[in-house]
Image (cartoon, grey):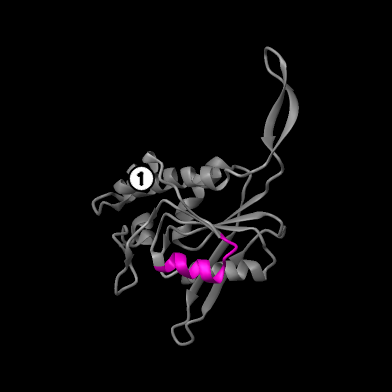
């Protein structure tokens, strides 16, 4: 597992705007889309290239193109949906799956109320969730994907707590994590500090 923190100045600037409590729902969504695009740029950096002969208005050349990399974006509902548009604008051919779950209060085990993924298991799966707090949802989602036969999985989050990174690292050491920021800690309510609040509420205006 490798932890990748995208410290590009534009990403950090936009994230600071998202953290402000006075940032509107509209602006929050726009910024999340933009940062997701930048994170997607980094998460696809190692895609292999092949070459084909093309003709420009001036000459023939061997031009690079992506070598058949097939991608699935798998948002963890509901907040993960906010990162999809930025990724699909970068990778228009990507398929989009959906992972919906909640935790049973008695058993503390995940209950999947919706799970829909493409049939082709060889695709790279990019799991999206803005906040990696305890890591429980991310770990459960990745476990389900592996049980379903997916082997190439990466996790893309906006902000994480060390506790969440540790949980994913221990349970899924083969999954790379991409973040815009690694924050200080979790508070007593398992919110990331300093964080940016409840990402789902801020994306959908339900606070």
Segment colored magenta: 163-175
Nearer-the-camera pick, 43 or 19 = 43
Residue 137 at x, y percent in the picture: 48, 69
Q: Residue furthest right?
A: 53
Left or right: 16, with 117 as reference point: left
The quadrant of the image that shows the N terminus is: bottom right
- Which residue of the protein is positioned furthest toward the top in this rendering? 58
User: Could you tell me which secondary element the residue under label 1 belongs to?
Assistant: helix
10 Å crowding of disc 1: few (<14), some (14-19), many (20+): some
- Spot occupied by residue 116 in the image (x, y as percentages of width and height): 62, 63
Count the marks: 1
Residue at 48% x, 70% y: name it.
167
Left or right: residue 24 compared with residue 39: left
With respect to residue 159, does 51 lie above or below? Answer: above
| Residue found at the very far bottom of the displayed protein | 106
The relative height of residue 65 versus residue 47 in the rendered view (above or below) is above
| Residue 28, x across and y down, in percent | 34, 49
Q: Which residue is mark 1?
A: 12
Q: Residue at x 31, y 73 (%)?
A: 189
Q: Verify whether residue 173 appears in magenta.
A: yes
In the image, taking residue 4 as reference, residue 19 lies left or right, namely left
**Location of residue 118 with respect to 40 vertically, above or below:** below
Quadrant containing the C terminus is bottom left
Indicate the position of residue 113 as horizontal and vertical percent values.
54, 72
Q: Residue at x 67, y 14 (%)?
A: 57
Q: Main secondary structure of the magenta part?
A: helix
Q: Quadrant of residue 96?
A: bottom right
Q: Report the side of 61 relative to 107 (left or right).
A: right
Q: Residue at x 67, y 63 (%)?
A: 150
In the rendered image, residue 138 lying in the magenta stretch gets the answer no
């Amino acid at each position: 597992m490798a932890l990748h923190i995208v410290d590009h100045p534009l990403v950090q600037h936009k994230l600071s705007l998202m953290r402000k409590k006075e940032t509107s729902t509209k602006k929050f969504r726009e910024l999340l889309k933009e940062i997701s695009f930048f994170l997607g740029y980094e998460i696809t950096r190692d895609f292999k290239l092949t070459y084909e002969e093309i003709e420009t208005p001036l000459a023939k050349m061997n031009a690079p193109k992506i070598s058949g990399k097939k991608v699935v974006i798998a948002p963890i509902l509901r907040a993960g949906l906010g990162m999809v548009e930025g990724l699909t604008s970068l990778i228009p051919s990507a398929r989009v799956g959906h992972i919906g779950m909640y935790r049973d209060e008695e058993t503390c085990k995940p209950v999947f109320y919706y799970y829909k993924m493409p049939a082709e298991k060889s695709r790279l799966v990019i799991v999206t969730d803005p906040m990696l707090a305890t890591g429980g949802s991310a770990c459960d989602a990745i476990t389900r994907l592996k049980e379903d036969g997916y082997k190439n999985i990466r996790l893309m989050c906006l902000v994480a707590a060390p506790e969440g990174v540790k949980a994913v690292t221990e349970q899924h050491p083969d999954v790379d994590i991409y973040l815009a920021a690694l924050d200080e800690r979790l508070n007593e309510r398992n919110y990331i500090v300093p964080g940016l609040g409840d990402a789902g509420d801020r994306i959908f205006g339900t606070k």
